[in-house]
Image (tube, grey):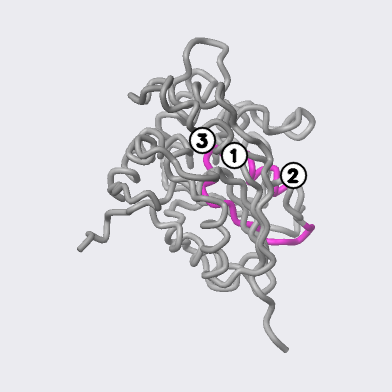
């Protein structure tokens, strides 16, 4: 029998839920502190040398999108896509960002839904929440609120939000079924899920699944595309689509595998083109008349 706090991936490699959660909180808390002190961040481990860019998190936002945001919000961006640019957000809507980090997607969404709308950011890390609230104050945005909670337990009522966004966070959870069930619960009938996440095509080497560091780095917890779609369907979502927005090649793999204790020369060629950022859309069915 498997313990409740142990997650077994599709490749049958067990990873402790508490180990992952603890490492994620510690790593992202340190990232928030680094942003405040040094103005830089990386979600996928320490990169080899100055000037190196994280292949997953770099170049996601256009300059005109972030020109009015605090530099700390931009530096703390740890996503793998730009869900606010791809999602349909309308004035007056209520939006929830799962794993809001330094707040960049919350602040961008708040501008799009306007003063009659509201955006909630959800994060479990105290340091990130403090940074996000400081960024909100600097940006002068009033229609946003940051909440402390885990994405597996959303502290909002049923049928409450119009749109859920998330940026490279669902893959960090070891209980993705619970995350999707909670997202479904808090969405209004007809509400939309519009998230960016890392997914994988084909088999992932066991060495990657075993790496706690690579869970933090958006890779080891990634679902296969078909598995992601299946979980969404099982939860009750409809109109599901997964659209690749960035495919990671062998040079990218070499960068995000560096300093993880993995044989880069052996593993990098095995994952060439297998990992990608996808924009994932789905809808909660509307109530029947």
In this figure, which residue is indicated by the disc labeled 3? 131
Mark 2 neighbour class, 10 Å CA radius: few under 14, some 14 to 19, many 20 or more:
some
The tag earlier along the polypeptide, 1 or 2, is 2
The tag earlier along the polypeptide, 2 or 3, is 2
In this figure, which residue is indicated by the disc labeled 1? 276
16 lies left or right of 90: left
Mark 3–mark 1 contact, CB under 8 Å? no
Q: Nearer the viewer, mark 1 or mark 2?
A: 1
Q: How much space separates mark 1 and mark 2, taking CA atoms?
A: 18 Å
Q: Position of residue 33 (x, y in %)?
A: 44, 27
Q: Position of residue 134 (x, y in %)?
A: 55, 36
The foreground one among 202 and 237 is 202
The foreground one among 202 and 70 is 202
Task: Locate the N terminus and report the quarter of the image it occupies.
Answer: bottom left
Q: Is residue 105 magenta?
A: yes
Task: Locate the C terminus and report the quarter of the image it occupies.
Answer: bottom right
Mark 3 neighbour class, 10 Å CA radius: few under 14, some 14 to 19, many 20 or more:
many
Q: Nearer the viewer, mark 2 or mark 3?
A: 2
Residue at x 62%, y 30% (from the top left corner): 74
In this figure, which residue is indicated by the disc labeled 2? 85
Q: Which residues are magenta?
A: 90-110
Mark 1 neighbour class, 10 Å CA radius: few under 14, some 14 to 19, many 20 or more:
many
Outermost residue, bottom side: 289
Label 2: element kind: helix
Q: How much space separates mark 2 and mark 3, taking CA atoms?
A: 23 Å
Q: Is residue 60 magenta?
A: no
Q: Position of residue 185 (x, y in %)?
A: 53, 70
- Which mark is drawn over residue 17? none
The tag earlier along the polypeptide, 3 or 1, is 3
Residue at x 45%, y 62% (from the top left corner): 177
Q: How much space separates mark 3 and mark 1, taking CA atoms?
A: 28 Å
């Amino acid at each position: 029998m498997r313990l409740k706090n142990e997650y077994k991936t599709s490749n049958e490699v067990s990873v402790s839920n508490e180990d992952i959660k603890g490492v994620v909180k510690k790593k992202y808390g340190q990232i928030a502190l680094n942003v405040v002190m040094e103005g830089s961040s990386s979600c996928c481990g320490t990169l080899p040398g100055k000037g190196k860019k994280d292949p997953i998190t770099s170049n996601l936002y256009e300059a005109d999108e972030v020109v009015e945001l605090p530099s700390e919000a931009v530096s703390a961006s740890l996503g793998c896509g730009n869900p606010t640019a791809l999602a349909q957000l309308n004035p007056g809507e209520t939006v929830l960002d799962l794993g809001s980090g330094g707040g960049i997607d919350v602040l961008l969404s708040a501008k799009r839904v306007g003063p009659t709308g509201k955006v909630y950011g959800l994060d479990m890390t105290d340091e990130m929440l403090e940074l996000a609230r400081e960024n909100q104050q600097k940006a002068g945005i009033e229609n946003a609120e940051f909440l402390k909670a885990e994405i597996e337990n959303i502290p909002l009522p049923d049928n409450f939000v119009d749109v859920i966004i998330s940026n490279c966070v669902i893959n960090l959870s070891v209980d993705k079924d619970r995350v999707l069930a909670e997202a479904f619960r808090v969405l209004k009938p007809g509400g939309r899920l519009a998230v960016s996440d890392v997914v994988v095509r084909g088999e992932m080497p066991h060495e990657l699944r075993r790496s706690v560091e690579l869970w933090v780095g958006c890779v080891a917890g990634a679902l296969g595309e078909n598995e992601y779609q299946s979980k969404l369907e099982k939860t009750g979502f409809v109109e599901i689509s997964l659209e690749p927005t960035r495919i990671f090649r062998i040079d990218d793999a070499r960068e995000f595998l560096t300093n993880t204790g993995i044989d880069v020369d052996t593993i990098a060629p095995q994952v060439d083109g297998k990992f990608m950022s996808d924009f994932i859309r789905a809808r909660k069915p509307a109530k029947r008349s």
